[in-house]
Image (cartoon, grey):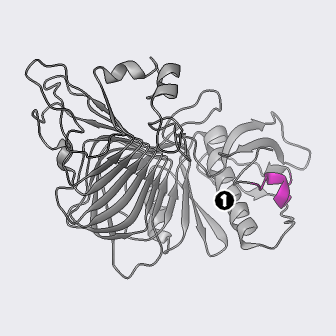
Amino acid sequence: MSKAFGDASVSDIGLAPISFLPITKRTKPFIIHFIYKPKTNSKFMKKLFLSLVAAIVAATATFAQSSLVATLSHEGGVQIFHGQTAYSQAMEAAGHGDIITLSSGRFNATNIKKGVTVRGAGFEADSVQRTFPTIISGDFTISLEESVTSSLTIEGIYHAGTIYVEKYLKEATFLKSSFSKIRFGNTIVSDLQIIHCQINQSVLFSNNSTANIINSYVTQPTNGGSNSNLEFTNCVITGSSYIPNNSYIYDLYNSVFNNCIIYSNGSEYPYCMILSPTNNVYYCIGYQGESANETSNIFQNMTNSSNIVVPNITSIFKNGTFYELTEDAKSKYLGADGTEVGIYGGDLPYSPTVLSPQITKCQVAKKTTADGKLSVDIEVKAAE
């Protein structure tokens, strides 16, 4: 079995071979038989075990039935929901602190009003690992009351609509997901972490936001005010084509940029934009515009000399990759820690592989045994 969750592996919890009772209709749930022999009584191992159960239920449904499954880990048990509305059913049944695990496939969106963990199978298809994305279809709203103490975590989903965030969002984590638009509105956002994500159109932070964006790709981030504190570390940050020359880039103020690559990817206005002097920028790479009437550079308001402008920023990326630097650029453009700038540098190099266990192999026997059971060989893998 593959390694999962740091130093723990499937063998550590004594997970025995798994079999299924025969089913007559595709819509009926699987009944899973297993032996749980933990080598330790720690809460960590219990959580790991429940995570594996949820992953097995979700992924075997994908392999064996091609159906949509959501599992809800609640008070030491696992509930199973099926179909396109499975996610919304699981959310309705969930309480603060619960974990919802989604199989690959397309689920209807649902509003989030609880401090839960939502885990998908990832936002990209991987033909080698035989994994497929979890897609959330439709706009949705995140609306948590100030009294909610359980933090929200969203991991491993693909969403092409708009997410609206209202009221309060405290110590939330968006992890290894692909988003299109995020609108925070008049929200109090504190200690948000966005890690290994893609935000492909725009993210509008409120004027009362504190957030760390780490090893992520972000298009057109804005905070539009002086009360917001954002820190971008090892990110690739791009803008759209409609922002005119010499605008303060993306209306970002009081933000910190470390080891980032920042440029405009627009064709209508291929101008060099500049960062507001309210920002602090260290060891970043920026675009020096090529227009004849352009005299400024993106870092002209910065007092330190660690930032570098380049005339053609796309030349530092390998063709056919997701913002991987060329070998020459990796050695030339280094961050404060001595690793390459951009999403593959730093302590947390970018990877879309989700942290929760995923089924990468599921072989089902052609025939049942004499007592009516069906043998299934399952391989579990998670990020190191």
Q: Quadrant of the N terminus?
A: top right
Percent of width and height locating residue 296? 15, 32
Q: Residue at x 51, y 27 (%)?
A: 330
Q: Is residue 292 above or below residue 286?
A: above
Q: Residue at x 47, y 44 (%)?
A: 336
Camera-side residue: 186 or 127? 186
Q: Is 107 left, or right, of 287 in this rendering?
A: right
Percent of width and height locating residue 342? 44, 36
Principal secondary structure, stretch drawn in magenta: loop
Secondary element at tag 1: helix
Q: Is residue 305 above or below residue 27?
A: above
Give the labeled residue for mark 1: 51
Q: Is residue 375 above or below residue 33?
A: above
On the image, which quarter does residue 73 sit in? bottom right
Camera-side residue: 67 or 104? 104
Percent of width and height locating residue 309? 30, 29
Q: Amino acid at mark 1?
A: Ser
Can residue 268 be seen here? The reply is: yes
Query: Magenta span has 8?
Result: yes
Percent of width and height locating residue 29? 64, 55
**Are there few (<14), some (14-19), or many (20+) residues within 10 Å of tag 1?**
many
Q: Residue at x 40, y 56 (%)?
A: 212
Q: Which residues are magenta?
A: 7-16
Query: Magenta span has 201?
Result: no
Q: Is 118 left, or right, of 5 in this rendering?
A: left
Can residue 25 be seen here? The reply is: no
Q: Is 279 left, or right, of 137 in this rendering?
A: left
